[in-house]
């Protein structure tokens, strides 16, 4: 069985951003449930936060490919 | 539906393996059309899709706005929706109603080009997300990078003042150099890096996942040696179809996020405070 340890590292690196994105959308859903008219504003903030958090997972993915051959 | 998917995904790899399963990887994204196999200036499939998408967008917008009517045609309605979405959600709300006008063409073309090229990943017979090659996000990010720095330098009156405005006012003196280094790194390195990598990573990873499920399903279904394995191959196809709809969502979202972040960076550049 072949494989590469870099991708295992990526799997570990994705845990943190996964939790982070979960927290962001939990807060977003809470906010919309409490105040439905704030939806538009909250949506932009939630997606911005998601983009920033997701960047960490994406960096992990790219590094997994970069360090694969090393 | 799944037979066309197999055909399309199979043709993407060149040749479908017959003996042993070969895991799809980044090599599946390299697809030269004209020119040699190793030259970096080879005309490739994503380049063709990119050119076609630009022609399509130009034609669409020009023909939709040629004779505008009070009661819009379908095409005009679609154009108005896209324009209104970019103008209101990203222009007016983020950049602010005072300064957003000059950036609307940039934001609208970024949004439509990225959206169409992302969606190319699930359009039958095209099925190649152009932005899944790192070159395309890098070029888009370079444009955004130049635009938001030039805007900031112009708006704040000189490069020195721009650098000075990176640190928030009212900091204690010993904290200023640390904050300056951090903010400088954010503005000049981390922002363009993450902007390009986010789009690229999402598109490449999503397409790779589809490749794994479709090619793996094909291998299990046709080359598996017992019925249980064949059935799981069929389930793999079903899951791939499900993931296609998920991909469609991600593709919309990434085009939106790229444009949204561009608008946020521009809003930073034109803000008077900070």
Image (cartoon, coloured by chain):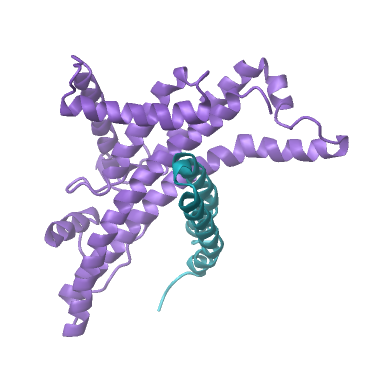
Chain colours: A cyan, B purple
**Residue B189 position within the rendered picture, expressed as x and y whole percent measured from the top left:** 61, 39
- The total number of labels drawn is 0
**Which residue: 55% across, 28% down?**
B267
**Residue A10 position within the rendered picture, expressed as x and y whole percent measured from the top left:** 51, 63
Of B205 and B47, the residue lying toward us: B205
Q: Quadrant of the C terminus of chain A?
A: bottom right
Q: Quadrant of the N terminus of chain A?
A: bottom left
Query: Can you see residue B92?
Result: yes
Would you say B208 lies left or right of B67 here?
Answer: right
**Which residue: 50% across, 41% down?**
B195
Of B59 and B15, the residue lying toward us: B59
Q: Is residue B228 above or below residue B117?
A: below
Would you say B164 lies left or right of B188 here?
Answer: right
**Which residue: 31% across, 46% down?**
B129
**Which residue: 41% across, 28% down?**
B88
**Residue B243 position within the rendered picture, expressed as x and y whole percent measured from the top left:** 29, 59
Of B197 and B115, the residue lying toward us: B115
Query: Can you see residue B146?
Result: no
**Residue B187 position within the rendered picture, expressed as x and y whole percent measured from the top left:** 62, 35
Q: Is residue B171 above or below residue A8?
A: above
Q: Is residue B238 above or below residue B11?
A: below
């Amino acid at each position: 069985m072949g494989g590469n340890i870099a991708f295992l590292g990526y799997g570990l690196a994705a845990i943190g951003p996964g939790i982070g994105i979960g927290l962001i959308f939990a807060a977003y859903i809470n906010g919309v449930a409490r105040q439905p008219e704030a939806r538009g504003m909250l949506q932009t903030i939630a997606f911005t936060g998601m983009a920033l958090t997701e960047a960490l997972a994406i960096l992990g993915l790219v590094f997994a490919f970069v360090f694969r051959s090393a | 539906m799944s037979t066309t998917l197999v055909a399309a995904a199979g043709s993407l790899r060149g040749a479908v393996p017959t003996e042993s399963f070969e895991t799809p990887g980044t090599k599946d994204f390299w697809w030269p059309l004209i020119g040699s196999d190793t030259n970096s200036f080879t005309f490739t499939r994503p380049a063709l899709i990119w050119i076609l998408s630009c022609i399509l967008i130009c034609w669409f917008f020009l023909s939709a706005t040629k004779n505008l009517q009070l009661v819009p045609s379908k095409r005009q309605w679609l154009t108005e929706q896209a324009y209104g979405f970019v103008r209101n959600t990203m222009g007016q709300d983020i950049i602010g109603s005072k300064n957003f006008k000059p950036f609307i063409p940039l934001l609208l073309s970024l949004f439509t080009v990225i959206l169409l090229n992302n969606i190319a990943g699930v359009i039958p017979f095209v099925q190649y997300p152009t932005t899944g090659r790192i070159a395309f996000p890098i070029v888009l990010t370079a444009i955004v990078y130049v635009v938001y720095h030039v805007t900031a330098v112009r708006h704040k009156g000189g490069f020195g003042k721009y650098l000075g405005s990176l640190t928030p006012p009212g900091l204690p003196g010993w904290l200023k150099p640390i904050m300056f280094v951090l903010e400088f790194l954010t503005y000049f390195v981390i922002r363009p890096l993450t902007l390009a990598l986010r789009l690229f990573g999402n598109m490449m990873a999503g397409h790779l996942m589809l490749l794994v499920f479709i090619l793996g399903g094909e291998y299990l279904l046709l080359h598996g040696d017992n019925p249980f394995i064949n059935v799981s191959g069929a389930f793999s196809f079903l899951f791939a179809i499900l993931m296609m709809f998920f991909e469609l969502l991600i593709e919309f979202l990434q085009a939106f996020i790229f444009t949204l972040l561009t608008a946020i960076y521009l809003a930073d550049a034109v803000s008077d405070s900070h």
